Amino acid sequence: MARSDTQAPRRPGTVRSRGFLHLGIRLLLALAWVGFLVAGTAAESGAFEVSARVDKTEATLEDQIFLTVSISGQRRLPSDPILPPLPDFSVTKGGSSSQTNIVNGSISTSVEATYLLTPRRAGSFTIGPVRIEKKGRTYQSQPISVKILPAASSTEERPMAFVTQHVDVQNPYVHQQIVYTFRFLRRVQSVEAEWDPPSFQGFWVEDLGKERQYEKILNGQRYAVTELKKALYPLSENSGQIGETRLTCTLVVQRGGAQRGVDNFLGGSFFGARGQTITKNLGAKPIPLDIRPLPEAGRPEAFEGLVGSFAVRAETGQSRLRVGDSTTLTVTVTGSGNLRDLVELSPEEIPGFKIYPDKPSFQVDVRGDRLHGTKVFKKALVPIEHGTLEVPPQEVPYFDPEKGSYQIAGTAPIRLTVEENGEKEPLHLVTATALPGSKSSIKILGKDILPIHTGLAGARRQAPSGMSLYAALTSLLLPPCIFLACYGRKRRQDRLETDQHIVRRKEARKKATRLLREAKRRIRQPGDKEYFGELSRGLKGLVGDKLNLNTLACTPVEIERCLLDKGMEAEKAQGAREFLEELEYDQYVSTRLEAGEREARHKKAQKLLAQLDKRL
């Protein structure tokens, strides 16, 4: 059978049209590649954009303003923007974040930095342009106007929180003890607080015990009060003041509605679904002082600047002794005032005695709201005469600010009976007798411990040899080696006792692990929020012990700043901050996590603990 192949006739120009189509695709691809290169070059050499914004343009002296600076542009951005002068604000640097985008071959990078501005005075202010400099060019943002209002008046019926400071005496004498009291009052829950005390320049400062926590009713409203007291001693007479003090705190309030009282958060049911935190910057006005000089009239010659109220007591170890024996004179000075300034007692010499003074001891304790001191002077008295000898009164002149005059605290004289010391027969080992015109002869009455060699046996070689030599060398070298080892161990122990930083670093991992272990016991209790507090304290405590800082009261942002200052990578420091914020949220917000989620928190805390311990 014949085979018949049928083919469709080709239309003219078909091959030519396909050639043009392939050529067009190549041209489009080439143009796209050139556009990509041009876009990348433009992005690399393009200009920057700098912008700044604040979270609020009107605030009070008790508020804080968050300033956010955004920089966008080419791939390589400056590390830090240049802030304008801000003399009316205290500036604290916060965190920063960066982002890189690639769109149609164009690469853009943006960086955001946050700053915390605390106003120092009321008024209208302008935050000047924020600048960056790159390759000789300057880019800047637009200025921002803000208005700072005065703090809430002290006559407000129900202020949310406020602070006060006062002293018990505003016109004290120089060296007089005055009591300074600082109080932080709030009627809502305070998550954290940081106190910036006044400088107390020109005063000697002593703490009056630990802080006190109690409740107080003001204007029919119950407040929780934290109170701290210090004893101040003016060092010179002048008209000055105790400067302004400020406290930055984070308060928990409701998002819409009346604030709850202090009873709610003390009962543990304060936080609800509508709770939120706000930051307040509270301040107390300066306290003017008129420090008076001590009067010249009636000032005793032996006066050493002691101011306060004091008493003196003296006693001896025994009242009857012999010539050459010794007894101890103990003089105890007690009272409220600058007892540290008392150096010596009068009189310094006592007829009929040799005096050997000892170093005085000093002890301070808190009685009520004042410091009470005790200073003990001890002197060894050795009589050099027999008979009835008298220890004169021990006197301490001081100035009493309540009476406004000089006083003398003294003791009655102490009489001692001193007897003659009987002569003892001297011990002679040899006696010498001499005849006229002849040589002296010596009579041996006794022999020393070592034998006297009278023959040649004593002249033989005494040096050891062989094993005796090694034993002799060992006996000679062993004591110095033992001494050096003991001395090194003692120095190391002394250094550990005096250098608390070394002790804290050494015990940091152990303390943090113990807190995490204690937290693990609470892991099966969904309603126990102290579990998250134990985890947070363990991590914060490790950072504080490693860096020799008090970080238990620090915020997660401050912890991140400490880690960055120590040289930790920004990503790891940010991760630590985010985890600590997560723990704070779990602790203070009513959220019940399942056992698996709580165990995941514990494992993450252990991993972060190991990273921080290795890095710090």
Image (spheres, rainbow, N blue to C red):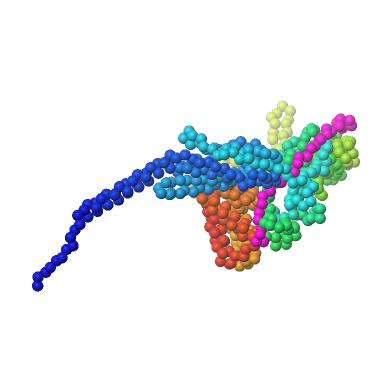
Kindly give the residue lying farthest to the left in the view shown: 1
Q: How many marks?
A: 0
- Chain part drawn in magenta: 272-301
Q: Is residue 275 magenta?
A: yes
Kindly give the residue lying farthest to the top in the view shown: 437
The location of residue 144, given as percent across then percent down, is 61, 40
Q: Is residue 370 left or right of residue 40?
A: right
Q: Quadrant of residue 265?
A: bottom right
Q: Is residue 590 visible?
A: yes
Q: Is residue 406 left or right of residue 4?
A: right
Viewer-nearest residue: 151 or 80: 151
Q: Quadrant of residue 263?
A: bottom right
The location of residue 149, given as percent across then percent down, is 71, 43
Q: Is residue 261 above or below residue 389?
A: below
Viewer-nearest residue: 394 or 558: 558
Residue at horizontal 73%, vertical 62%?
267
Viewer-nearest residue: 55 or 320: 55
Residue at horizontal 33%, vertical 46%?
31
Q: Is residue 480 visible?
A: no
Q: Is residue 64 left or right of residue 422?
A: left
The location of residue 441, given as percent across then percent down, is 69, 33
Quadrant of the drawing holding the N terminus? bottom left
Residue at horizontal 77%, vertical 46%?
153
Residue at horizontal 68%, vertical 55%?
252
Q: Is residue 15 magenta?
A: no
The location of residue 505, given as percent across then percent down, is 59, 50
Viewer-nearest residue: 232 or 8: 8
